[in-house]
Each structure stands twice: as C-alpha cells, then as structure tokens.
Amino acid sequence: MVVYWNKDQETMDREALAGFQLERLQWTLQQAGKSPHYKKIFADRKIEPGEIIHLEDIRQLPFTTKEDLRAQFPYGLLSVDLKEVVRLHSSSGTTGQATVVFHNQKDIANWADLVSRCMYMTGVRQDDVFQNLTGYGLFTGGLGFHYGGERLGALTIPSGTGNTKRQILLMQQFGTTVIHLSPSYAMRLMQVMGELGVDPSVDLRLRIAFLGAEPHSEEIRQRVERYFGVEAYNSYGLSEMNGPGVAFECPEKRGMHIWEDAFLLEIVDPGTLEPVETGQEGELVLTTLKREAMPIIRYRTSDLARVLPGPCPCGRTHSRLARIMGRTDDMLIIKGVNIFPIQVEQTLMEIPEVGQNYLIILERAAGMD
Ligand code: ADP
Ligand code: ZN
C-alpha cells in the first residue's frame, strides 16, 4: 500500500487539481500585482487579473525571464512589505547582475513541506539519518533539503560540501541512511571511498540517495545505486521556483512528479513560444501558485522538458517530467555549478597573449560533463 505525505494533494483527481490551480492562479495574480514589476506590466498591457477565468487564459500574460529578474534587482518583484520577508536566496551573478528570490515565513513552510513530500515519497521516515552533502548558503540545495528533512522529522546532518573524508566519517559515526548530493560529488565520493578502502555494503548503512542540481544520465543513477547499495532518485528544482522540491521521482523511477498544486506547468516551443503538443519536448515554463513574498508568473526556465504520458502506478496524479538533459541557452552545468561561455571568455581575455577566438571543448567523462 502506498502511503502519502499529503494524500489529498498528491492524489487529487485531475479535474479537482485544475480547479485548485485556477483558484491559486487567480490569487497569485492579485498578489503579484502588488509588486512594482507586475503592477506596471498589468497596467501597461491593461491586464485585469480578475479576467483570467480559465487556466489557458494565462497565455495572455507575458513570460518572465532571467533578464526581468536582473532588471528588477533587488526589490522589483517583491509583493509584500520587507518586514514580512525572512529569507533570500541569490544567484552568484558571475554572468552579470545577480538575481534574488525572497520568502516570507509561510513560503519557507510551504517549501519545506514540498521537500518533505518528495523525501517521504521515496520512503524516508522519522527514524532515518539524513546527511545533506550540498552547499548551505545562497545556493538553495542546502537549506531547501535541510528544512525538508527536519519537517519530516529525520535526523538531519548539515554536512555541506567538501571535506570528503569527514563526510564518510560522519556517515560511519551516525549511521547515515539517506544522502543528498550532486551526481558529480557522488562520483568523487566513490573515488575517495575507494582510496580509503571503505566498502559501503559493509561499513555504511546507506539506503536512499537524492541526486540533483545538474543533468545526469540513467547510467549515473545505476552506478550510484550499485556502488552505495541505495535507491537513487532524481531531484529537480531551480532557485526561481524555491529550489529543490519542484519535481521528484517516486519509487516507480519513471519520470519526476511535478507538484502541480504549487507550480503551474506549461511546455512551449522555445522558438514560437506557443504550447507544444502534449508529450513533445519544449521549454519548461512555470508559475508559482502558493508563493506570497515573490510570486513569479510564467518563468522561462530554459530547461528542455517533456511530459510522460499516462497515469503513474503510484497513484499520484501530478504530471511526470522526463529526465532533463538539455537547455535552450548555452549554460553548462559542471560539478553542479552553472557556467556560461562568457565566463570562460572573460577569464581568457584577461590574458594579454590570447587572441580573439576560442573554442570550448565539453567532454563527457563517465556520463558527466
Ligand atoms: P541549483 O543549481 O540550486 O539546482 P539553480 O537555480 O542555480 O539551482 O539552477 C537550476 C538549474 O539546474 C535548472 O534550471 C536545471 O537546468 C538544473 N537542474 C537542477 N536539477 C536538475 C536535475 N535533476 N536534472 C537536470 N538539471 C537540473
Ligand atoms: Zn509516481
């Protein structure tokens, strides 16, 4: 029997889900209209949030892009008083102006609940020991999973990234059963365990791993599962939509359920920006449905996604996304870090001897860029 974290939300029939989404969308538009950015957009385009009466009407609204977030930095998309805001996460800004996302207390609670839902779905329970091997700080992976683990009631170890020997020691000392890490760090961990002569099947108690923050193949999943003796699950998120907790694999491991009670999903042709046929690949566009401090409407993620057909045997009704392997822009994700070619160029061009042209060669070693 499948046990759910939020049964009502996770198994809501599609019609009820659409009704719920419409209600949340209407609320979101009202809320977004309080921010300087959307207030101006609604006024310029004579958009009355009250006139959005079908989910499809969202197509009348403009997309929001990374450039909009940059142009509105820092407070242009804030929809509540600053005194209500309790947290921000920000991108590094190495490719230009940084972007920032704000949360109030309710947003943080909702986000934590979504992450708990994901973890619970894969079988994590209160008696698990969860080691979070991702960066704490402005990056969302650390705090996002941390609050999710605590809300679920698991013992949550904020071990962060790096210091691999110590990570392994923590796993041994506390009997870690669940880990969250980037696929590239999983590869590094394997290497160091090999060097130290640690055998996960004898020396560790791991049973579940969450792999997120960067594209990785089915082969990588299987390698992680075999080496650590775990079930590994794909975790997808982006800071504009909180971070982790947007889409996550269930035990069926056939696509990631995208939580449609919290995010409205569209998949558009990146050229024409028109919706693609159901099941076709296109750019993932997301609208927050619950966020109060900073709602975002029709955010172009630049991620290429595809909805898998049919219902999932796990009973959850939320759509499933196929593994995300590509982007519409030229961003590379190396060891979980977002890199744009322009950054390579800036570094190269600081060297006076270097000429005008350069070539970036991206190699794929052991299934990883
Ligand atoms: P983070 O690096 O914290 O996940 P960012 O907002 O910096 O968050 O980057 C989000 C981007 O990372 C996504 O738009 C996507 O391109 C990529 N990403 C995150 N998780 C996955 C995943 N499971 N598979 C493929 N790409 C992913
Ligand atoms: Zn499922």
Image: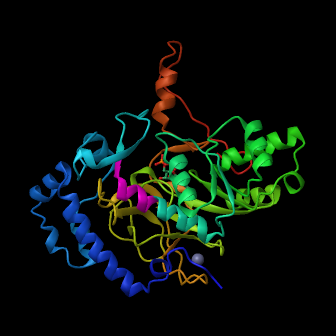
Q: Is residue 274 visible?
A: yes
Image quarter of the C terminus: top right
Is 110 part of what is drawn in magenta? yes
Residue 153 place in picture, x, y as percent = 59, 61
Instruction: Return the residue nearer the eye: 304 or 12.
Output: 12
Q: Is residue 88 left or right of residue 188?
A: left
Residue 346 place in picture, x, y as percent = 46, 25
Q: Is residue 246 visible?
A: no
Would you identify the image quadrant in which residue 155 lies?
Answer: bottom right
Would you identify the image quadrant in which residue 278 lies?
Answer: bottom left
Residue 313, compared with residue 143, is above or below; it is below
Residue 47 place in picture, x, y as percent = 13, 65
Image quarter of the N terminus: bottom right
Range covered by the magenta-colored residues = 102-111
Residue pictured at 87% horizontal, 45% vertical = 198
Residue 194, compared with residue 284, is above or below; it is above
Q: Main secondary structure of the magenta part?
A: helix
Instruction: Return the residue nearer the eye: 24 or 237.
Output: 24
Q: Is residue 277 left or right of residue 272?
A: right
Is 365 part of what is drawn in magenta? no
Q: How is the image coloured?
A: rainbow
Residue pictured at 70% horizontal, 51% vertical = 367
Residue 78 place in picture, x, y as percent = 25, 49
